Image (cartoon, rainbow, N blue to C red):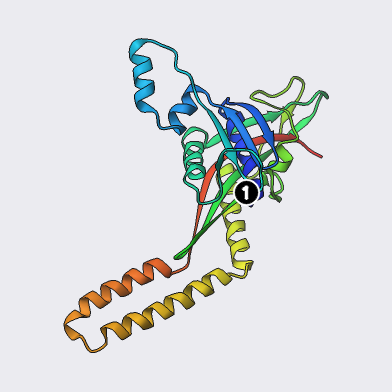
Amino acid sequence: MQQHDIQSFLERFFIATHCHILERSDGHIRVQLTAEMDKQLMNRPFYWHYMERIGAIGEPLQLSLITKPSATKEGEYIHFGSPRLHQIFSIAKMNGRFIRLYEQVSERSVALHPWLHTNILLSYECDRKQDRLLSLGIHLISGSIVESFYNVLKEKQWGVTVPDYCFTISPLIKPLSGLGRLEAFVERLIASETHHWADEARARWKEELALLKHFYEGIEEKQEEYENEKEALRQRYEPKIHMSVINGGLFYLQAK
C-alpha cells in the first residue's frame, strides 16, 4: 500500500468510526466527525469539558483531508510521516485492533471460509524515514496469502452474524499462527528488495564519521566526547526497518 492508497484507508477508518463522508474525490475526502472522533482527533478538550459541564450538546467539526498535492480542494495534506496520519494509526490501534465479520450472501447452504486480514506498517528509518502500509490476507484453510487484500474486502457486504442458512468452516490454521505466517511473509518481502536507501544512508554515515574523526584527531582528553558523538551518528544513520501490526480481523468469505 503506497501514498495513493491512503485515501482508501482513511475512508475505511471513518466509515468504521461512524463518521459521515460528506464529500470525496480523487485525492480529497471531507467528513463530518462524530463527537467521539472530534475528541480524539481535534484536540479540543476545553470545549468538550465546557459542553459537558453545562449539559449542552457539542458540535463536532468537519475534517477535510488532501491525499494528493494535485487535488484542487482545500484541506490538510496527509501523507506517510505526517502527524495526522500517525494519529489516525494510533486511534485505529486503540479502538479497533481486531474485528470478526461475515460476508452477507443471499444463497443458501453457502460455506464461509476464514481469512485473517492485517494492516501492517513498515517504517524504513535512518537519518530519513519512509512508511509503507501493507494490507495482507491469509486463507486459514490453505495458507494462501493475498496482497492488497482490502481490494477484496471492499467489494463485499458484511455483517456481525452468520447469514441465515449459511455455515462457517473451522480454521485449520489458528489466527495466531496465521499472523506469524504473515510476519514471515513480510520479512521475506523485505529480504527480496533492493535497499538503495540503506546503502545511501551508510555512505552518508561514513562521511560524517570521517569528519568527526578528523575533528577530534590528536585530542586525547576529548576521547569520551568523541565516542559519544560517534554513537549518536550510529543511532542517526544506521538503517532500520520496524514492522508493526496496526489492526486486523477475521473475515468469513464464500469460496470463489
Report x, y in % for residue 30. 61, 32
Kindly state the secondary structure of the residue where label 1 is placed: loop
- Residue 81 shows in this picture: yes
Mark 1, Cα crowd under 10 Å, few <14 / some 14-19 / many 20+, is few
Q: Does the image show residue 249?
A: no
Residue at 57 percent of width and 61 percent of height = 187
Image quarter (top left, top right, bottom left or bottom right) of the C terminus: top right
Query: In the image, what residue occupies the spot 46% across and 33% down?
Result: 41
Left or right: where 161 falls relative to 56: right
Residue 187 drawn above or below residue 222 = above
Identify which amino acid the numbered label 1 is placed on: Pro
Image location (x, y in percent) of residue 78:
55, 45
Number of numbered labels in the structure image: 1
Residue 46's place in the image compared with 210, above or below, is: above
> In the visual, does 53 lie left or right of 60?
left
Considering every residue shown, the one lying at the far top of the view is 55
